[in-house]
Image (cartoon, rainbow, N blue to C red):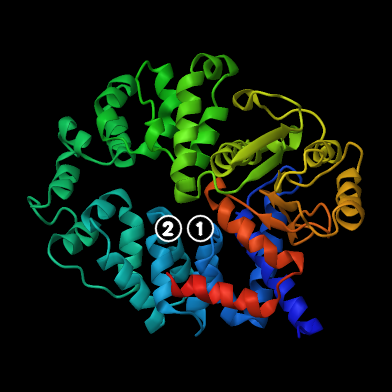
Amino acid sequence: METYADLIECEDVLIFANAAITSTGQREFHGTAGEQRLSLDFLHRYVQGNYPDLYAAALALDINDHNAALIIANLLSGRAGDGRLIAWRLERMSPPRVYRLFRRLRRDGVNNRRARAVVRDWLTGRPDLAFDAVKYRAQVKSAVRHAHLRLPGELGDFLFAPFSRARYETPVLEAWRRAHFDKSALYDLPYTVAEGFAARHGIGREIFLERIAPRLTRLERLRLTESASRDKVDTEPDLAAMPLARLASYILSLRADARASRRAELVGALRAAAARVAGARAGTWGSVAAVLDDSFSSFGSPVKRRRPLAVALACHYLLEALAGDYRSLWLSRRTDPLQVRPYGPTPLGQRILDALEHRPGLLVIVSDGWDNAPPGLAGEVLRVWRRKLDPGGEVGIVHINPVYDADRFDVRRLSPMVPTAGIRDAEDLPALVELARFAEGRTGLGELRTYLEDRAARR
């Protein structure tokens, strides 16, 4: 039988999971960056101090890279943590994020044997460390020095005495050396490095972008699309290859008329990305309804522009792929998902009523939870539905929230009657619906521990 302490522990771990999935320590619509960081720091300290095994196991969940880096830094500062799980997580983080983590370890004076081994193993496992040495030269140099590593061949000379050699055998290192005096060599370098050399040589922006375009990565193409178009250079990203959440963010950044004129292309790309995520689960979820938040607060913040709305749009297409029968209800009552925009209040209660009228097998609510038209209606609707109209739970209801509320140390909930899970990327939706059942009170600490251990064991 679950004790009161077990229930508290289960709730604490779920609150931490929601925070680690949604919060990146950046400004949100209803909270400053400082509030976010302070709240998140408290949660990390609290969970690590009280539940060290579950804190380490959280690396196996679909948490964001910001919180994964915080967990790894805290684990390496102490003695807890599975080295294999840490290594697995580092392999799935972006290189800039990992190098920032290593820089933090150096700043905090974390230089024990475990930390040095983690740095060494990650660097030796890089597919092209010479490329990293050029693109992230200062970060690689700092990590090598902090871990007391001796790099083989030319890399050591390149990092610590770059002009001691008259020539490098490694092509990217030689291109870097030649780019100091040969304009043509800079186009063999990573974009961020080549950009600095282009400015040094006085090469015009339009000429530079036109010649470097074939070497741009998918993310660089996405970031440069708007600025490059002003210079009449085509860096249009490959929509077919883009992840679902990033694709939704890109589409929302387009003007309304551009979305309308490219409707077939954009909808096709969204559905293809959703089908990749759904995989074998496509069409297996039965009857699904979704209440999707496109109110003004879905704008997010200047540093996370339209992020909540992008999550809602991506979830719409993913749920469409997963469901056998699907119905979507946007708060604005728009019927064209491609033309949604952040606007107006948040009348969640009325739209939840509209969705429940059709008695779907599953209702998914994607919202930041700031129900305000009128305030509290959504919670009352869900309370009456669960207690009076559907006490047996024939209609499954899950609230998915993309925004961390620093004041509550959790994502904002609509009702204690309905489980809530934090979300960052729509690709995580199936796993989060599974995780949300632990917040519904039907399963307890034992099942949650087993779930986390199983996730960690599969890594």
Q: Are marks 1 and 2 in contact (CB under 8 Å)?
A: yes
Q: Tell me which label, 1 or 2, sits earlier in the chain.
A: 1
Q: In this view, does 88 lie to the left or right of 430?
A: left
**Element type where label 1 sits in the image:** helix
Circle 1 residue: 65
The C terminus, quarter of image: bottom left
Circle on res. 93: 2
| In front of the other: 181 or 3 | 3
Looking at the picture, which amino acid does disc 2 mark? Met
Q: In this view, does 215 lie to the left or right of 250?
A: left
Query: Is residue 229 in view from this perspective?
Result: yes
Image coordinates of residue 419 in percent, x first then y, are: 74, 59
Q: Is residue 82 above or below residue 285?
A: below
| In front of the other: 320 or 153 | 320
Q: Is residue 178 left or right of residue 388?
A: left
Q: Give the residue drawn at x 37%, y 31%.
A: 238
Label 2 environment density (alpha carbons within 10 Å; few <14, some 14–19, many ≥20): some
Looking at the picture, which amino acid does disc 1 mark? Asp
Q: In this view, does 108 lie above or below 291?
A: below
Image coordinates of residue 367 in percent, x first then y, are: 72, 44
**Element type where label 2 sits in the image:** loop
Q: Give the residue drawn at x 63%, y 56%.
A: 433
Image coordinates of residue 181 in percent, x first then y, are: 16, 36
Q: Give the residue drawn at x 54%, y 23%.
A: 254
